[in-house]
């Protein structure tokens, strides 16, 4: 009975990936009819509809999407079991799931992935681009890359892989209207565009000329959960932004933003997070080694 359940789940996953009963069934060595019967058994056992069926299109229901996500974890567990037998020197293969901040992922990570995928042709990747702080253990990710965010969770190991200079800037129009701050104290009278996620706002921490670290909030009527949104809000004249240089280079070069308080130094770490466990799958290990090497080359 257990084997039948697992087979039905595998058939469902194949059909969901292929987008059709015919192709999904063929991937599992089944006819269209046999694949359809497997899905019917699975839906009857679960008591929910997993697939919306029309003459032209096959799509997942809300329940089907949730079940598919759980199915990915089942497949990952099977791959982990195989890898644990093969050992750390095994060929990287299977699905690698990573979560990366949106702008950093698109501007820095994605342009680098071509070389990794060419080097390891048996690895598939699923990349979540989000500024949300994801629980990588609960949501089944192999690792996360974060900007300036570490984690106290004992289930996770963190490693700093790069650092970026952080720049404070505002649009020429904002500075003309509100005046340019000449010291950290002046920021108390300005609109500071803060990052905020799940009602937790991140205040600025700046190192002054004498080495003192000060916490700055200023006025913060507008809070955003995206680094790019903060940058765009600064360009629009809505306030002062404090962001990593990779987000600001083109805007400063084109005079859309003006760097201010440049004598105050600040950096932000790029942190790699991954679950703490004795065995790390070859696909995760090779990716970590590769991204660490690439980040070092960019430093």
Image (cartoon, rainbow, N blue to C red):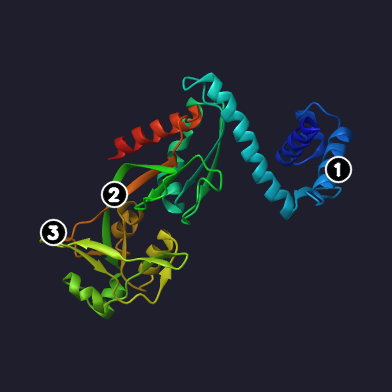
Return the residue nearer the eye: 175 or 67. 67
Q: Which mark is residue 125?
A: none
Residue 114 % position (x, y): 48, 34
Return the residue nearer the eye: 252 or 138. 138
Q: Are marks 3 and 2 in contact (CB under 8 Å)?
A: no
Above or below, comparing residue 52 to residue 24 in the picture = below
Q: CA distance from mark 3 to mark 2?
A: 19 Å
Query: The residue tagged with tag 2: helix, strand or loop?
Result: strand
Foreground label between 2 and 1: 1
- Residue wearing tag 2: 164
- Counting residues from the start of the chain, the first of labels 1 and 3 encountered is 1
Return the residue nearer the eye: 7 or 107. 7
Q: Are marks 2 and 1 in contact (CB under 8 Å)?
A: no
Above or below, comparing residue 272 to residue 220 in the picture = above
Query: The residue tagged with tag 1: helix, strand or loop?
Result: helix
Q: Is residue 115 visible?
A: no
Residue occupying image coordinates x 85% and y 41%: 41
- Counting residues from the start of the chain, the first of labels 2 and 1 encountered is 1
- Residue wearing tag 3: 211
Above or below, comparing residue 204 to residue 22 in the picture = below
111 left or right of 213? right
Density class for disc 2 (Cα within 10 Å; few <14, some 14-19, many ≥20) is some
């Amino acid at each position: 009975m257990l084997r039948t359940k697992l087979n039905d789940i595998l058939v469902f996953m194949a059909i969901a990936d292929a987008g059709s009963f015919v192709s999904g069934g063929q991937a599992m060595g089944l006819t269209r009819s046999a694949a359809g019967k497997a899905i019917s058994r699975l839906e009857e056992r679960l008591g929910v509809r997993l697939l919306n069926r029309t003459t032209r299109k096959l799509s997942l229901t809300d329940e089907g999407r949730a079940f598919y996500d759980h199915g990915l974890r089942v497949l990952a567990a099977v791959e982990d079991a195989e890898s644990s037998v093969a050992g750390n020197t095994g060929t990287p293969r299977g699905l690698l799931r990573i979560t990366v901040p949106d702008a950093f992922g698109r501007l820095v990570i994605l342009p680098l992935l071509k070389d990794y995928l060419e080097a390891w042709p048996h690895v598939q990747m699923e990349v979540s681009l989000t500024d949300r702080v994801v629980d990588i253990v609960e949501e089944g990710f192999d690792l996360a890359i974060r900007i300036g965010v570490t984690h106290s969770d004992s289930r996770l190991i963190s490693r700093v892989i790069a650092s970026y200079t952080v720049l404070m800037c505002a649009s020429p129009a904002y500075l003309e209207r509100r005046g340019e701050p000449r010291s950290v104290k002046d920021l108390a009278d300005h609109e500071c565009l803060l990052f905020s996620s799940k009602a937790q706002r991140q205040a600025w921490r700046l190192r002054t000329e004498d080495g003192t670290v000060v916490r700055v909030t200023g006025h913060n009527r507008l809070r955003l959960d995206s680094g790019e949104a903060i940058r765009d809000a600064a360009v629009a004249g809505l306030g002062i932004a404090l962001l990593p240089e990779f987000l600001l280079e083109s805007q400063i070069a084109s005079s859309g933003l003006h760097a201010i308080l440049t004598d105050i130094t600040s950096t932000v770490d790029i942190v790699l997070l991954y679950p703490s466990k004795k065995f790390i799958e070859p696909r995760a290990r090779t990716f970590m080694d590769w991204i660490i090497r690439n980040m070092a080359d960019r430093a």
